[in-house]
Amino acid sequence: MTQYLVAIHHPDDFEPFSEPETTQEDIRALNREMVAAGIRVFVGGLAPVSEAVAVRRRPDGNLLATDGPYLETKEHIGGFWVLELASRDDALAWARKAALACRAPVEVRAFNEAPRPRQ
């Protein structure tokens, strides 16, 4: 089984608690379905991107922390699921459900498998 990140993208000005009750209920129903299927490893919603802090390594080796997101884009990850699934096709099927429930774009990425220790 492989773990997949299913990430929801929102515009920069998205307010997490501004979603209509119908959207919130669809997301709750999706979460219940994931739990019942035994595939949900972790789920989390993120604070607004305006609260992000980026930490970068400077050329001199010191670190610089700045307010704001790491990337200058119009969308950022607003929340995500980590799902354990048998295939990429299964991950895409759940991502379609997430896009419908959240009414937002969804990105799917497999986690790299950790290298096995040498014997």
Image (cartoon, rainbow, N blue to C red):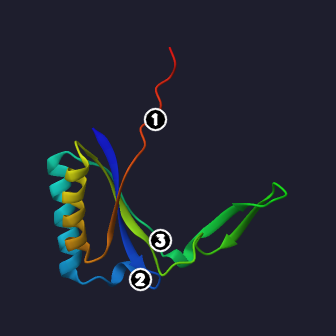
Amino acid at dot 1 = Ala
Residue 114: assigned label? 1
Q: Residue at x 33, y 45 (%)?
A: 3
Residue 82, image x, y percentages: 34, 52
108 shown above or below 13:
above
Specify the quadrant that holds the N terminus: top left
- Secondary structure under tag 1 reads loop
Which residue corresponds to the image point at 85% horizontal and 57% vertical from the top-left? 60
Q: CB of mark 3 within 8 Å of CB of mark 1?
A: no
Pointer 2 local density, CA inside 10 Å: few below 14, some 14–19, many at least 20: some
Q: Which residue is mark 2?
A: 14
Q: Indicate whether 45 appears above or below 11.
A: above
Q: Is residue 101 left or right of residue 77?
A: left
The tag earlier along the polypeptide, 2 or 1, is 2
Is 114 on the left-hand or right-hand side of 104? right
Residue at image x 30%, y 76%? 104
Residue to which mark 3 is pinned: 47
Amino acid identity at mark 2:
Phe
Left-right relation of 74 to 85: right
